[in-house]
Amino acid sequence: MCGRFVQCSDPDIYASHFDAVTLFDAKPRYNLAPTQQVLVVRKTEEGGGELVPLRWGLIPSWSKGPDSGYSMINARAETLDTKPAYRNAFKHRRCLIPTEGFYEWKAAGKTKTPFLIRRADGEPFGMAGLWERWHGKDDETIESCTIIVTEANALIRGLHDRMPIIISPADYAAWLNPENKDRDALRGLLRPADPEPWMFREVSRKVNSPNNDGPELIEPVAA
């Protein structure tokens, strides 16, 4: 699964990388956790790309709301087109979640050690996601998202058996396009990332608490 990740670039950098427009500022985040606002790239009704903040943890449009027990921070790639919570979003509301890295914990007995997984060049990348719009009483509206996960690649398998889907820049447009109805082609994008451009390093256990959020969290633990 993916339960914590980083968004530490200026929104304008994400907007440029993902060919999107953004109209707000956001401070760097080094320890994003479920239910918090995260930056997401999606298509507008006019067809352009936009970078917007959404709640992390999908709230299905038919649910009672954020307190109904649907803590859907991750969606399994294998069942996107069969699970009622994700089926329509997979067809019409796909998105990308920009990040510089995500965390996983390696278990050894009762001890869990956190690691940061990122590109070796440190560049941002896009995790595949889905988004939804939920309407409540008194015109309350919540837009939320989930990160799609699949089996881990050879690099990450020693830490965890699952990892986020990483979409290649060449496939951004196809993934984000709501008019793209080619289910087989879309499912073909939902595969583990090639291990070669990636690396991981042990980081501070301060990342265990979502109350901690600073650049020191992504620094390697001294040998």
Image (cartoon, rainbow, N blue to C red):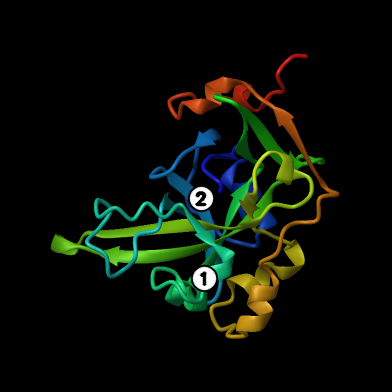
Front position in the image: 69 or 93: 69
Choose between 18 and 110: the one closer to the eye. 110
Instruction: Tell me if residue 167 comes above or below residue 90 in the rendering.
Output: above
Image point 34% across, 60% down: which residue? 59
Q: Where is residue 21? Give x, y as percent.
A: 56, 59
Per the image, label 2 sits on a secondary structure element best described as strand
Q: Residue at x 53, y 39 (%)?
A: 4
The quarter of the picture where residue 123 lies is top right
| Number of marks in picture | 2
Residue nearest the observer in this picture, 150 or 146: 150
Question: Label 1 is placed on what type of residue?
Answer: Leu
Of all residues, the one furthest to the front in this rendering is 109
Residue 174, given in percent of the width and then of the height, sits at 66, 75
CB contact under 8 Å: marks 1 and 2: no
Q: Residue at x 78, y 14 (%)?
A: 223
Report the amino acid beneath label 2: Leu
Which residue corresponds to mark 2? Answer: 39
Q: Residues within 10 Å of mark 1 (few under 14, many from 20)?
A: some
Q: Residue furthest left?
A: 138
What residue would you read off at disc 1?
80
Residue 101 spot, x, y in % from top left: 66, 41
Crowdedness near tag 2: few (<14), some (14–19) or many (≥20) residues, C-alpha within 10 Å: many
Spatial distance from mark 1 to mark 2, Cα to Cα?
22 Å
